[in-house]
Image (cartoon, grey):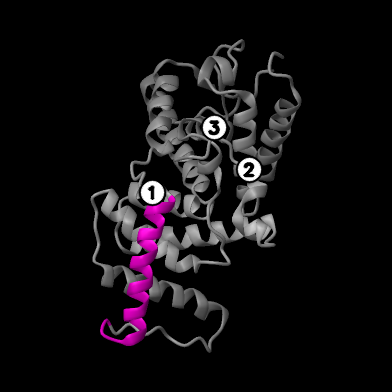
Amino acid sequence: MMPASFDISQLPSLQDGMSIQEESMKRRKTCRFIEEAGRILKLPRVAIATAMVFFHRFYAKHSFAQHDRFEVAVACLLLAAKTEESPKKLVVVLEECQKLKWRGMQAGSATVKPPDLDPKGEEFSKLKERVLLLERVILHTIGFELSIDHPYKFLVEQIKQLVQGKKLIYQNNHTPVGLSSPQQQQQHMMNEMVQLAMNFANDSMHTSLCLQFDPKKIAFTCVYLAAQFGHLVPTNESDDWCDSLLSIDSVSLASIALQLIELIAERKGSDPTVLNQVKEQLEVWTTLEPQTKRPRVE
């Protein structure tokens, strides 16, 4: 149930006076919470991703001012775990999420009261009721659409086509050493691209990109970024990334990639040289008319 036309200015939280920066920050922070909670609960990657999509879709229709984002996150995890056939007991999910939330709060203040984890206690019982109610509200909000496609499967398929079809080569001075055969180089390229693209796909789940674009476009953009950060270029210089290699329009690719780069740039240790090179080329693409021939990106 991805909105046919997503207008970020119409998000309920913004209508309530929240800035776009704060709205985006709450999405990122809560998605990190969902990701860590999912890891603790030993949920499969697809279930964690589904929980984040549910979360983004919920707050596309509701304001952060109206619903506690952590309780919504817990309800999304519960629902996603069931959807992806990895159900967890409500009490277990609540206990682990409460402990995780408390650890995060404790890091900022040593005086934070520890959570009441007594399953028979009044506070815990009320929390269970709120989360179960939120689970039903989420279901209605997303229109009972529980089957979610994620970028992961599309990006692996696309990388296989590019690498096995010998569509990409390493830039000068970036060919890996110690790989004697073409088969070894090809396997190295495949593994490196998949890892990089998966990382970008994981990053995309912390943003509202799943509300703006279909998962295949997000996947193709992750493949493009993986090639850029892996120092790969088209084997045939006449091949265009968008038309010949990925079948995605340049405006969508640039929009998705720029949002991901903005997120990555906030991290310590990010390579500013590669980030700036890619960003400059993407900004050129956004100024070109659709019918204009796009330059080869290196």
Can you say whether 93 is above or below 87 in the image?
below
Question: Which residue is at the front of the view, 12 or 120?
Answer: 12
Which residue is identified by label 1?
A: 50
* Disc 1 crowd, CA 10 A, few/some/many (<14, 14-19, 20+): many
Amino acid type, callout 1: Thr
Amino acid type, callout 3: Thr
- Residue where numbered disc 2 is placed: 7
The secondary element bearing badge 3 is classed as helix
First along the sequence among labels 3 and 2: 2
Say if the magenta span includes residue 124: yes
Left of 256 or right of it: where is 139? left
Quarter placement of the N terminus? top left
SS assignment for the magenta stretch, majority: helix
Where 53 falls versus 182 (above or below)? Answer: below
Q: Quadrant of the C terminus?
A: top right
Dot 2 or dot 1: first in sequence order is 2
Residue 85 position, x and y percent, is 23, 50
The residue that mark 3 highlights is 221
Helix, strand or loop for disc 1: helix
Q: Distance between the residues labelled 3 and 2?
A: 21 Å
What stretch of residues is rendered in magenta?
119-141
Per the model, the C-alpha gap separating discs 2 and 1 is 22 Å
- Observer-side mark, 2 or 1, equals 2
Does the image show residue 187? Answer: yes
Left or right? Give the position of 87 relative to 270: left
**Vertical comparison of 58 with 131: above or below:** above
Q: Which amino acid does label 2 sit on?
A: Asp
